[in-house]
Image (cartoon, rainbow, N blue to C red):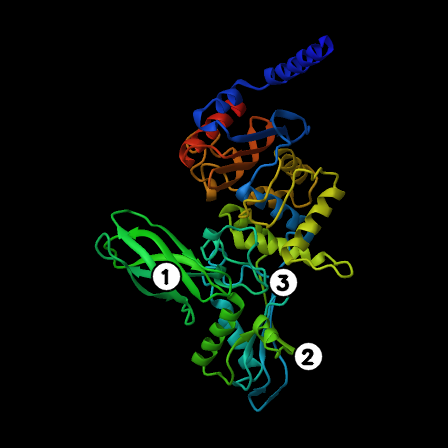
Amino acid sequence: MIRKISFFLLLSGLCLSVGAQIPQPIRQFLRKPYMEGASFALIVKDVDSGETVFAYDTSRQLTPASVMKTVTTATALEILGEDYRFPTTLEYDGSIEKGLLKGNLYIKGSGDPSLGSAHLATDHKRFLQEWISALRKAGIHKIQGAVIADESVFDTEGTSLKWVGEDMGSYYGAGSYGLCVFDNLYKLALQTGAPGTRPKLKGTDPELPGIRFHNYLTAQRVSSDSSFIVGAPFATDRYLYGIVPANREWYPLKGDIPDPALFLAEYLTRQLEHAGITVGESPSCFRISREEGRWKAGKRTRIVTTYSPTLREIVAVTNRVSHNLFADALLKTIGLRYTPHEGEVLSSFSRGIRVLREYWREKGIDLSGVWMYDGSGLAAANKLSTAFVADLLVYMRTCSQHSTAFYESLPVAGVEGSVRNFLKGSPLQGKARLKSGSMSRVKGYAGYVSEGDKRYAIALFVNNYACDGRPMNAAIEQLLLQLLH
C-alpha cells in the first residue's frame, strides 16, 4: 500500500512539474469559460535552430480545417515543382474532310482546377476563343459527332465521402474532377421582396439548362444571407434553404456546378454554335459515355493545348483565399504518381494521401498525428498534430527548394486573404504569414512569425470551444501577442 501511495505521489509530482512549465498566457487562455471541455494544442519553433520555444499538447490529434492546405500545397510544390503547369488539350478522332470533322471533338483534362478561374485571369473565358480559333485554323467548320469531355484522369469521387451534408452543393464545396472550369461555380440571381416572402429565381450565370432548384428561401430584414444550396455531385436537383436580405432587385448566391466535365462539353458546344461551327450530336463526357457503353479509346489527334498558370501561382491562390477545389485537385494530382498493387482499388483522394504520406516519411517526419481524407480540410474527420505541422513548416523554410514559393503563398496577417482581419492593428500585423482554418467550433492557424531577428514556425488548433468565432479569434490574437511580442 505504501508503494502504491508513493507511486501516486511521484506521478502527481511529475504532472505538477510539467504543469508548472505551461506559460502563463496559455494558462489564462485555457481558463476562459468557453474552453471548458475544449481541446487545444500549440507549438512555436525557432525556424533556424529547430528548437521548441513553446509547446502544449503537441501530439494531440485535432481537426485542422483549412490548415490542411499547408500540408497539401507544400507536398505539391515538393513533388510537382513550382513551375509545373496543367495541360488541357482539344483532340479529335476520325478525319477532317472539306471542313467537316467526321468524328468527335474531345476536351482532354489533366485535373487542372484553374481553367477559367476568376482568381487567375481577368479575362477568364479567353481560353474558349483560343480553342475556337484553333479549330478554324485546323479547318474545322462543322463537327459530325459530339463534343465529349474526357475527365478520366481522376475518378468520379469529386467530393470526399467524409464531407458533411451542408457542404454538398455549396460554393466552397465544389468537387474536383479531371476537368474543371470557372472554379466549378455558378451564380444564382435572386429578386427578393418583403420580409417573410419567398424570393424569385432569375437564372444562373453561367447558364445551367438542366438544373432544377427547389426554393425554400425566405426574405428577412438582414444585410447578408444565411443560406445553403444543397445537392449531391452529378445531381440536377438543388435545394435552397435559409434567409436572404429583403427588397433586393438583384441578390446573388453561389453554388457548385454539379457535373463540371459535362457542363464544359455543353458550354463549348453552345460557344461553337454561336461561332458558326455546328455540332451534329449532343455533348457528353467520359463518365456518361462509359456508363452507356459508348466510350471510344482509339487514336486521337491533338489540335491545341492550353496550359494553366504555374503551380506557384495556383498554390498562392489556394492558401490566400483558401480555395478548396484547388487544394483537392493538387492532392489528386500528386496521387497520379502512385502505382496501385495488383488488385488494389483506391480513390483519387486515397492515392494522393498515399503519395503524400510516403514523401514526408522519407524526409524523416513523424506522421503518427496525420489522418487525411481530402486535401482541402473540409472533412471533419481529418486530424493533424501541431508537432507534425511545425516540423513540416520548419522543413519548408530551411530545406525545400521551393521555400520562397511556399512562404509567399501564405497570406500576411492583418493585410490580405483569409487572415486580413486577424492581428490587424496589433504589433504583429504584417509580421506573420499564416494559413487559417475554421468550421463549426474549430479554429486553427499555422505559418510563420517574424519578430526582431527571430523567425518562428507556429501551429495552433482549438476544437469544441463553446463560443462564437469572433471571441475565439480575439483570444487567440491575445495569446499570440503575449507569447511572441
Residue 407: x and y in percent read: 59, 41
Gap between marks 3 and 2 measured at Cα? 19 Å
**Disc 2/disc 1 C-alpha distance (Å):** 39 Å
Quote the CA–CA distance across marks 3 and 1.
Answer: 28 Å
Q: Which amino acid does label 3 sit on?
A: Phe
Q: Which label was assigned to residue 414?
A: none
Q: Tag 1: Cα neighbours inside 10 Å, few (<14), some, or many (≥20)?
A: many
Answer with mark 2 or mark 1, whichever residue precedes in sequence. Answer: 1
Q: Quadrant of residue 425?
A: top left
Q: Residue beneath label 2, please?
A: 298
Q: In which quarter of the image is the N terminus?
A: top right
Residue 305: x and y in percent read: 60, 70
Which residue carries the number 3 mark?
Answer: 154
Number of disc labels: 3
Residue plotted at (60% across, 41% down)? 383
Q: As drawn, is 456 to the left or to the right of 214? A: right
Q: Mark 1 points at which residue?
A: 188
Q: In this view, does 249 lie to the left or right of 389?
A: left
Residues packed near mark 2 inside 10 Å, few (<14), some (14 to 19) or many (20 plus): few
Which element is circle 1 on? strand
Q: Is residue 451 visible?
A: yes
In the depicted structure, whether residue 280 falls above or below residue 377: below
Q: Residue at x 57, y 91 (%)?
A: 98
